[in-house]
Image (tube, rainbow, N blue to C red):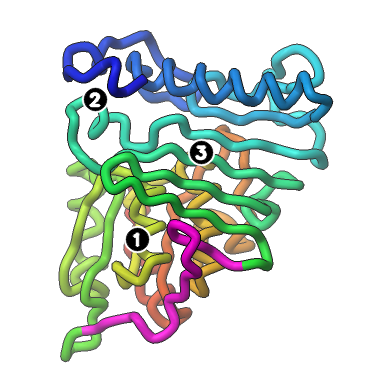
Amino acid sequence: MLDGHPSTSERAVELGRGEGGDQTVMIDAAAEELIFAELAALHAAGHSFVAISEERGTVRFDGPQLAGAGAAGGLRVVVDPIDGSLNAKRRLSPYTVSIAVADGPTMADVSFGFVYDFGSAEEWTAERGRGALLNDVALSVDGSERRNASGLLELVAIEMAWPRALAASTPALAGAAHRLRTFGSIAFSLCQLAGGRLDGVATLSRARSVDTAAAQLIVRESGGHVAFIACEDPLGASLEMTDRSPVIAAQTQAALAQLRGVPSSQA
């Protein structure tokens, strides 16, 4: 689909706002259509589940579309057809597809995560309790954290960096990070942490479940740590898009504590 729409003008055609609140562009809708065709085939084969997707919202695959979350139990498939749509429509990297499967309503209930980076052709996966993989090679962040001589984390990715959120978060960032990177895809950034390429990740405002569900499991199964700081339980964030939380992630609990004050309280 992406190869068939190579130009920025083709990719950036706006189709209105999706259920996640962002402007839907042509490639968002086309990617979601491809994924939902696969979900429909699974349903036709006898499987029942609820899909939660950035553009369509919550869709029950055993009956009509729902306005709400559905029952507390049951299987959920959380989909971001293109995480990093702004990059994708402008032919910048990175951008990813992110798919998570959960057997309950929160981040702690995610049992499978899949993120594919279109720029590098890297495939990141995780199964709860069975570890994380990058292109079928096991991941571990043990011992890969780096700090400068002052104890600051050497390289931290920030996401959702609207100018007002960045300005409000700058003092806390200066106390936690030596260098920053902004990639434009939360799923991508979290996977880089799982691969030992970053020392921390912080969103500067509230993130949606579709952006984080798959990659947060990949981080945790690589040995890293994740906290959704708007929730009392660090992994208690809902998979529904109506609930959002800033997200921080790091390779160690000490680094996670350093990042806790970074997301802007004003965002």
The circle drawn on residue 210 is: 3
The answer to which quarter of the image holds residue 64 is: top right
Counting residues from the N terminus, which is met first, the one under dot 1 or under dot 2? 2
- Image point 18% across, 27% down: which residue? 90
Local packing at callout 3 (Cα closer than 10 Å; few below 14, some 14-19, many 20+) is many
* Residue closest to the far bottom: 149
Q: Which residue is mark 1?
A: 192
Residue range corresponding to the magenta coloring: 131-147
Q: Judging from the image, what secondary structure is the residue with disc 2 in?
A: helix
- Say whether residue 135 is magenta: yes
The quadrant of the image that shows the N terminus is: top left
Local packing at callout 2 (Cα closer than 10 Å; few below 14, some 14-19, many 20+) is many
Q: Amino acid at mark 3?
A: Val
103 on left or right of 93: right
Foreground label between 2 and 3: 2
- Image point 44% across, 22% down: which residue? 31
Q: Which residue is mark 2?
A: 89
Query: Compared to 146, does 134 lie above or below?
Result: above
